[in-house]
Image: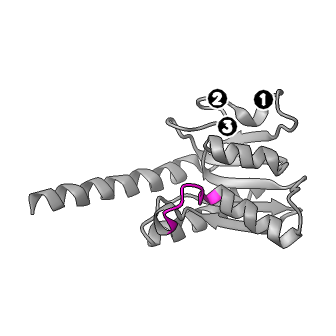
Amino acid sequence: MDRDVYFMRVALEEARKAKDIGEVPIGAIVVLQDEIIGVGHNLRETTQNAVTHAEILAIQDACEKLGTWRLEGADLYVTLEPCPMCSGAIILSRINRVIYGAKDLKAGCAGTLMNLLKDPRFNHQCDVLSGVLGEECGSMLTDFFRMIRMRKKDKKKK
């Protein structure tokens, strides 16, 4: 199995953890030398904290494990294209490469709305690979939001 597909499947498992607790199903992992050193899934609703995105939590986990904020040489796998905040954290932590599944048409900053990760005005840029298991990642999000809308609709009927 392709390395990127393998690690994206692990990120999808993190996304399922988020879904299981009613969070938007986004998962992320940080990989260094083929070892997973950081994991995270969305916890915004649980924590009521705007910054507890999957990527931020995975980066924090990796930094704690390594004892440094520099994640040079590491790859970040995430099921949804990073937003501006997460793109900033990726740049500042010196992640080498970002691999994501589904595009984020409303907030994607790794190529959709803009590409902060490749902007030469920053002191660090990273390589970006999009669309790895993109259909599966996108379907998980679409299904989640469809379920939310149906629940709201059912509530209104009652």
- Which of the 4 image quarters holds residue 2? bottom right
Query: Crowdedness of circle 2 by 10 Å Cα count: few (<14), some, many (20+)?
Result: some
The answer to whether any part of residue 6 appears in the image is: no
SS for callout 3? loop
- Where residue 87 sits in the image (x, y, percent)? 69, 43
Q: Residue at x 76, y 61 (%)?
A: 30
Which circle's residue, 3 or 1, is located before the other in the chain?
3
Which circle's residue, 1 or 2, is located before the other in the chain?
2
| Mark 2: amino acid | Met
Q: Are marks 3 and 2 in contact (CB under 8 Å)?
A: no
Q: Is residue 94 magenta?
A: no
Q: Is residue 98 left or right of residue 44?
A: right
Marks 1 and 2, how far apart in space? 9 Å
Q: Is residue 44 left or right of residue 60?
A: left
The residue nearer to you, when weighing 12 against 148, is 148
Q: Is residue 36 left or right of residue 44?
A: right
Residue indicated by mark 1: 119
Q: Are marks 1 and 2 in contact (CB under 8 Å)?
A: yes
* Rendered image: mark on residue 12: none
Stretch of the chain drawn in magenta: 47-54
Quadrant of the image containing the C terminus: bottom left
SS for callout 2? loop
Q: Residue at x 79, y 44 (%)?
A: 91
- Where residue 96 sits in the image (x, y, percent)? 85, 47
| Mark 1: amino acid | Asp
Q: Main secondary structure of the magenta part?
A: loop
Question: Does 123 appear above or below 138?
Answer: above
Q: Is residue 112 left or right of residue 158?
A: right
* Rendered image: mark on residue 114: 2
Quadrant of the image containing the N terminus: bottom right
